[in-house]
């Protein structure tokens, strides 16, 4: 019972979700104008793509078309087709939710419409639930457009209610989603407060304790309560307009008149009886997709949808207390097999900024064979989060990035095989005395003078070189096929370059012209 | 200094001594006393771009940086080589005191990637020495990239060095310190005195004047390992 008392529910109402799924290009533009910290990266990648494909304007074209067209979401209910939601431009022209489609067309002939798709909406809500697991282990989707998050247990971690809400709002802004948030100790009250916030545009305030709920809800009109039509009409005819009046009525009288649903709702609102919402269960593996509203001609416009997927991925990773090591991004094309991009990380991590940056760099190196119609992100390898990515204590400090992050970003663009650490190898043959590695080096140094540059293949030296040192004989590897027996010298050529040259020493039988010449093996830089 | 000037400097807010701001920068000793004395900062200055101009590799151009690099890696800080012309030879680096565990080597495919990688590593903050070899043809884009690199270096706390071909020494560069390196044998005086080593021409330095100095080559004629009866 102790924990029950501390429950705080945040109802995140996402009223424009169906519309925003199609308006993400509008936000893409916004995203570019107010870039995050990795500004140089994004713009660089996009510039390069624009140069490569010669389609610099395509991106902005997409965003502007979507932004300026009136757009509405249409729902089929029986024979009727009703407008559920519309964007600002359509609203300015006079389209309102609740209009039939024919009427809307009469007002605005150029109206673009989208059919409301329940499964898509459910998928999007689920993606957002994954994201919301960032903030709490208890998240419940409430169809069609709300997510309930139990934040009471998270307040201490995120540093208080205001900062938590700020963070949630910031994340949603980043994904281009508008939200109204209501907070109360009971889920019903939170849902009601979020509805009131959305409809009136005024934040009704947050309820801290159960006693405050009744006070906070007292001025809310009864019509806002999720009651059936019969009850609403009955209450209206009885002259009950505000919740205050309703709360004052004896519950038995209400039940007798309107059935048990009404008094049950009031009890649930005030937290006298517990309410239950089925909580969101984390899937075993992470695999989520996004359909693009318009075909994407190049990868630069994919950043925004990828960002949404990353938010979901990071939520999933935080909730499972793990980090990602490898994931696949599939770019689906129309009538062509999908392009699959695998992204690897040196250390498992769940840092949203970093994941997004590496994915963006990787995608920027891609040349598309066909326009992209949909995206899919699948976690392949998940592991415990690496030491350098632990974010428990440095959440708000502006610490510099780690070396591993730099290697991830560089590797995404120029290939991981191009990055290495030099390593000493236990071999006296100069060409075998070094190696590439990612592991720590053994501590063992040679005391002889060695050149800083090693040529990939020894080259014949010009005749004009001057030997400046005594010889150092290296004889090694007679047991394998790469037998080496050479005398090494330090020499200087006419240009003043310091060379590391050698002369082959062979047994008398195999003497040939080659072995008499000096060969350059390195440069003293 | 003229006392009138001193009073002016003290009273007028719009007047300051040009050099003073360069002395306050963080520096890293070059490991060569002669060079430290000649540079106004007293060493490689941290947070600016240093440009080393070399006609050809193999004249001791990288040795100039190794003491500083050894200092950086010894402090468990990372260094990076971007687009080195040849394989950096691990035994030689280790011999110079560079901790190979803190040295990242990046081979890039083209010049744009070299610039980009250098900038990324400078902005990363975990790298305290970033050395890049740039082999681009000059152009408008190029100057812009160099400027970007200089800005990235200014915001970082890293030793940022680029190697360039000597033919660019006459052209403008945003780098704060530019040194032309050539073998001492090219200079007549040194040749006559049989002095081997590296001739440094400081052609641009913020807060200082152009200067020239000589760094002798290490003694290569000491016995190399076990002496063998060698026929030359």
Image (tube, rainbow, N blue to C red):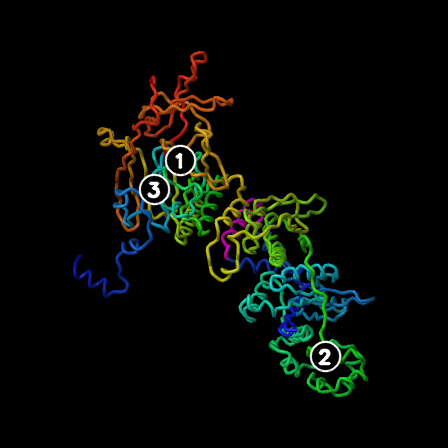
Res. A64 in view: no
Q: Is residue A520 left or right of residue B214?
A: right
Specify the quadrant that holds the C terminus of chain A: top left
Are dots 1 and 3 on a single chain?
A: no
Q: Mark 3 points at which residue?
A: B67
Q: Residue furthest right?
A: A79
Q: Position of residue A334 (x, y in %)?
A: 71, 47
> Observer-nearest residue: A515 or A174?
A515
Residue with the mark numbered 1? A445
Does the image show residue B142?
yes
Q: Farthest residue to the top: give it.
A: A509
Q: Residue A267 carries which label?
A: 2
Rendered location of residue B44, percent (x, y): 33, 47
Foreground mark, 2 or 1?
1
Magenta residue span: A37-56
- Distance from Cα at disc 2 to Cα at disc 3: 76 Å
Q: Nearer the viewer, mark 2 or mark 3?
A: 2
Q: Does the magenta stretch include residue A52?
A: yes
Count residues near mark 2 (Cα–Cα under 10 Å), then give few for <14, some for 14-19, many for 20+: some
Residue B142 - label = none
A267 w.r.t. A23: above or below: below
**Disc 2 to disc 3: CB gap under 8 Å:** no
């Amino acid at each position: 019972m102790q924990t029950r008392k501390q429950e705080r529910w945040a109802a995140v109402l996402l009223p424009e979700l169906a519309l925003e799924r199609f308006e993400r290009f509008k936000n893409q533009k916004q995203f570019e104008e107010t870039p995050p910290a990795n500004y140089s990266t994004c713009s660089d990648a996009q510039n390069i793509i624009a140069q490569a494909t010669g389609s610099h304007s395509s991106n902005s074209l997409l965003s502007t078309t979507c932004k300026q067209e009136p757009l509405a979401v249409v729902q089929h209910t029986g024979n009727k087709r009703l407008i559920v939601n519309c964007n600002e431009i359509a609203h300015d022209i006079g389209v309102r939710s609740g209009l039939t489609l024919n009427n809307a067309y009469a007002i605005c002939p150029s109206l673009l419409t989208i059919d409301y798709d329940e499964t898509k909406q459910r998928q999007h809500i689920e993606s957002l639930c994954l994201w919301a697991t960032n903030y709490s282990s208890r998240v419940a989707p409430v169809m069609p457009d709300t997510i309930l998050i139990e934040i009471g247990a998270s307040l201490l971690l995120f540093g208080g209610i205001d900062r938590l809400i700020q963070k949630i709002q910031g994340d949603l802004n980043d994904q281009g989603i508008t939200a109204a948030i209501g907070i109360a100790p009971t889920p019903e009250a939170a849902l009601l407060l979020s509805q009131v916030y959305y409809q009136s545009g005024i934040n009704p305030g947050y309820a801290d304790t159960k006693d405050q709920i009744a006070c906070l809800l007292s001025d809310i009109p009864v019509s806002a309560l999720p009651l059936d039509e019969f009850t609403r009409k009955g209450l209206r005819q009885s002259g009950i307009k505000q919740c205050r009046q309703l709360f004052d009525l004896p519950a038995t009288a209400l039940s007798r008149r309107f059935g048990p649903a009404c008094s049950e709702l009031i009890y649930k609102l005030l937290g006298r009886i517990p309410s239950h919402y089925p909580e969101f269960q984390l899937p075993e593996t992470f695999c989520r997709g996004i359909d693009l509203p318009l075909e994407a001609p190049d990868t630069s416009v994919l950043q925004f949808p990828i960002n949404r997927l990353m938010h979901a991925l990071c939520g999933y990773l935080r909730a499972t207390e793990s980090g990602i090591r490898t994931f696949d991004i599939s770019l689906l094309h129309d009538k062509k097999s999908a392009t699959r991009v695998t992204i690897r990380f040196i250390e498992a991590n769940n840092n949203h900024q970093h994941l997004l940056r590496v994915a963006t760099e990787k995608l920027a190196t891609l040349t598309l064979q066909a326009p992209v119609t949909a995206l899919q992100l699948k976690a392949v390898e998940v592991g415990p989060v690496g030491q350098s990515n632990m974010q428990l204590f440095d959440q708000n400090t502006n610490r510099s990035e780690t070396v591993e992050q730099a290697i991830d970003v560089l590797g995404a663009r120029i290939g991981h095989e191009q990055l290495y650490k030099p390593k000493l190898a236990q071999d006296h043959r100069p060409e075998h005395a070094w190696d590439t590695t990612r592991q720590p080096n053994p501590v063992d140094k040679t005391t002889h003078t060695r050149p800083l540059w090693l040529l990939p293949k020894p080259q014949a030296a010009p005749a004009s070189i001057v030997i400046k040192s005594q010889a150092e004989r290296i004889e090694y590897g007679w047991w394998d096929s790469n037998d080496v027996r050479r005398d090494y010298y330090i020499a200087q050529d006419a240009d003043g370059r310091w060379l590391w040259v050698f002369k082959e020493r062979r047994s008398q039988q195999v003497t040939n012209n080659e072995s008499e010449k000096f060969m350059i093996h390195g440069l003293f830089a | 200094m003229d006392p009138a000037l001193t009073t002016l400097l003290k009273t007028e807010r719009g007047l300051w001594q040009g050099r003073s701001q360069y002395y306050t920068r963080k520096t890293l000793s070059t490991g060569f006393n002669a060079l430290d004395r000649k540079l106004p900062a007293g060493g490689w200055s941290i947070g600016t771009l240093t440009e080393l101009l070399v006609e050809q590799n193999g004249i001791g151009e990288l040795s100039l940086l190794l003491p500083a690099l050894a200092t950086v890696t010894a402090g468990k800080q990372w260094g990076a080589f971007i687009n080195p012309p040849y394989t950096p030879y691990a035994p030689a680096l280790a011999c110079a005191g560079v901790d190979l565990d803190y040295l990242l080597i990046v081979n890039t495919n083209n010049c744009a990637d070299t610039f980009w990688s250098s900038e990324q590593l400078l902005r990363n903050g975990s790298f305290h020495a970033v050395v890049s070899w740039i082999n681009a043809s000059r152009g408008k884009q190029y100057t812009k990239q160099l400027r970007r690199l200089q800005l990235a270096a200014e915001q970082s706390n890293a030793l940022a060095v680029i190697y360039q071909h000597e033919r660019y020494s006459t052209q403008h560069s945003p780098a704060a310190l530019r040194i032309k390196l050539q073998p001492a044998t090219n200079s007549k005086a040194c040749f006559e005195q049989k002095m081997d080593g590296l001739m440094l021409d400081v052609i641009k330095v913020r807060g200082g004047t152009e200067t020239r100095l000589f760094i002798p080559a290490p003694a290569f004629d000491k016995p190399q390992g076990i002496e063998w009866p060698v026929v030359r």
